[in-house]
Image (cartoon, rainbow, N blue to C red):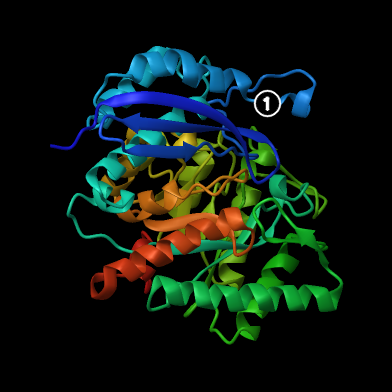
């Protein structure tokens, strides 16, 4: 008999990849199993996300989390000690009820999500299983197609480039390990190209190169050159993925592209992206218009969803109800899955399942403020999401996730299956 009664819940103040405080939670079970997890934090956030509780005031720019940690040690611990960790839905329901707000504002989304994830790790430890295998429950899984940033922009690089992420995907690779090999060569080639051109200014929040480009299209041109310089065929072996994060520079149907010195309406924004789709090997675009532009999402998906993954991030905020409504309206064909947007793993999984029911692409994603926590690597595999977005191919908080999936792939041996092109919600030949 596996002992899964929660005996202790402890909060801890730790640090994220931007040197900011965040919340770690440690959950102990009666059989001496222990699980730990750390809350990430986003820079580009949707208005519907669960809210991190920060202390305010002068220390650390108001970003300290002592109140959130206190809520873990106080009301959250009192509510969970004695409960069965083997019923995660009940645990998450208790956390939601204890907070009592629609956006986790009272106890803090950071305190709640770290607790929800720590309970998962404790359950896996008690069962003697890796987290991904516990989640899979014996069902077949795929190794996710990685979506990896090469150039950072938007809120991740002081808005030096309007588009937030210029990424590569390697659906033509034969394995997850090979996809990382290819990406490493592209990342290296991109750095060499930028150094020679005098365009390199360091790295952005998620580890991608911080560029000095004269136009958004220059980033796309350089990315194609990097793919070719690394010895791969753009569009066949390797494709481009964009996170436009349009909510960062657009509102009420008006989009101000600072780098290009122009303002576009929704139709103009869609036309610009259509031109990029025609000119470059782009297979995925995240938040092509702002979160308040549902009709823009619908129009873009209707026009280009047959040849491009159209991802809702700020638009859908890992919310099952929003995913359902978007599917009914034809307003996206993929959803980004971020546990701290929802606040609990039960709500996160519900959003992913809603997407899968409607044939959406599902992409488990990290945040710009990350840590060594590898929970999302296990979610991507165990829930058979098909795709994983972690950031770039540098910095240990990013590499920890990629390396964890490598270990999972190795453990599967001959049973390992790489998602590749099958992860994308459109036919490759369409």
Q: Is residue 218 visible?
A: yes
Please say if 234 is above or below 388.
Answer: below
> Residue tagged by mark 1?
64
Residue 275 shown left or right of residue 132 in the figure: right
The C terminus, quarter of image: bottom left
Residue 248 shown left or right of residue 352 in the figure: right
Q: Nearer the viewer, residue 297 or 66?
A: 66
Q: Residue at x 25, y 49 (%)?
A: 128
Q: Residue at x 55, y 46 (%)?
A: 287
Q: Nearer the viewer, residue 372 or 149?
A: 372
Q: Residue at x 44, y 60 (%)?
A: 404
Q: Residue at x 28, y 73 (%)?
A: 413
Please say if 297 is above or below 104.
Answer: below
The N terminus, quarter of image: top left
Could you tell me residue 335's position as x and y percent?
42, 46
Q: Nearer the viewer, residue 198 or 106?
A: 106
Total numbered labels: 1
Q: Point out the residue furthest to the right here.
A: 198
Q: Image quarter for residue 196?
A: bottom right
Could you tell me residue 407's position as x and y percent?
39, 65
Could you tell me residue 101's position as x and y percent?
46, 14
Mark 1, Cα crowd under 10 Å, few <14 / some 14-19 / many 20+, is many
Q: Tag 1, which secondary structure?
A: loop
Q: Point out the residue furthest to the front here.
A: 32
Q: Point out the residue furthest to the left here.
A: 1
């Amino acid at each position: 008999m596996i002992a899964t009664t929660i005996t202790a819940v402890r909060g801890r103040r730790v640090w994220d990849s931007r040197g900011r405080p965040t919340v770690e939670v440690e959950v102990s079970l009666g059989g001496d199993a222990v699980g730990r997890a750390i809350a990430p934090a986003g820079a580009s956030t949707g208005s519907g996300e669960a809210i991190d509780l920060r202390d305010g005031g002068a220390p650390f720019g108001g970003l300290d989390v002592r109140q959130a940690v206190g809520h873990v040690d106080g009301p959250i611990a009192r509510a969970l000690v004695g409960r069965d960790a083997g019923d995660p839905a009940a645990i998450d329901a208790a956390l939601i009820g204890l907070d009592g707000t629609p956006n986790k504002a009272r106890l803090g989304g950071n305190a709640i999500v770290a607790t929800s994830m720590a309970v998962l790790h404790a359950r896996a430890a008690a069962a003697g299983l890796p987290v991904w295998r516990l989640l899979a429950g014996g069902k077949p899984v795929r190794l996710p197609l990685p979506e990896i940033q090469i150039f950072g922009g938007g809120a991740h690089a002081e808005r030096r480039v309007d588009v937030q992420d210029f990424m590569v995907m390697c659906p033509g690779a034969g394995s997850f390990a090979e996809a990382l090999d290819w990406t490493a060569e592209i990342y290296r080639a991109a750095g060499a190209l930028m150094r020679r051109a005098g365009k390199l200014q360091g790295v952005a929040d998620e580890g991608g190169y911080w560029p000095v480009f004269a136009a958004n299209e220059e980033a796309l041109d350089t990315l194609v050159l990097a793919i070719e310089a690394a010895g791969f065929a753009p569009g066949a072996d390797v494709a481009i993925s964009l996170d436009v994060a349009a909510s960062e520079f657009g509102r009420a149907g008006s989009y101000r592209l600072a780098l290009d010195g122009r303002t576009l309406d929704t139709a103009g924004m869609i036309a610009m992206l259509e031109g990029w789709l025609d000119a470059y090997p782009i297979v995925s675009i995240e938040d092509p218009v702002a979160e308040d532009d549902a009709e823009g999402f619908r129009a873009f998906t209707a026009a280009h969803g047959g040849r491009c993954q159209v991802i809702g991030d700020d638009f859908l905020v890992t919310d099952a109800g929003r995913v359902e409504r978007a599917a009914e309206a034809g307003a996206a064909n993929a959803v980004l899955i971020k546990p701290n947007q929802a606040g609990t793993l039960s709500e996160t999984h519900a959003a992913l399942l809603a997407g899968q029911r409607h044939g959406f692409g599902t992409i488990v994603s990290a945040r710009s403020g990350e840590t060594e926590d590898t929970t999302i690597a296990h979610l991507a595999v165990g829930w058979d999401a098909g795709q994983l977005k972690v950031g770039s191919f540098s910095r240990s908080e990013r590499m920890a996730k990629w390396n964890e999936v490598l270990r999972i792939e190795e453990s599967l041996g001959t049973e390992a299956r790489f998602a590749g092109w099958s992860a994308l919600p459109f036919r490759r030949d369409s």
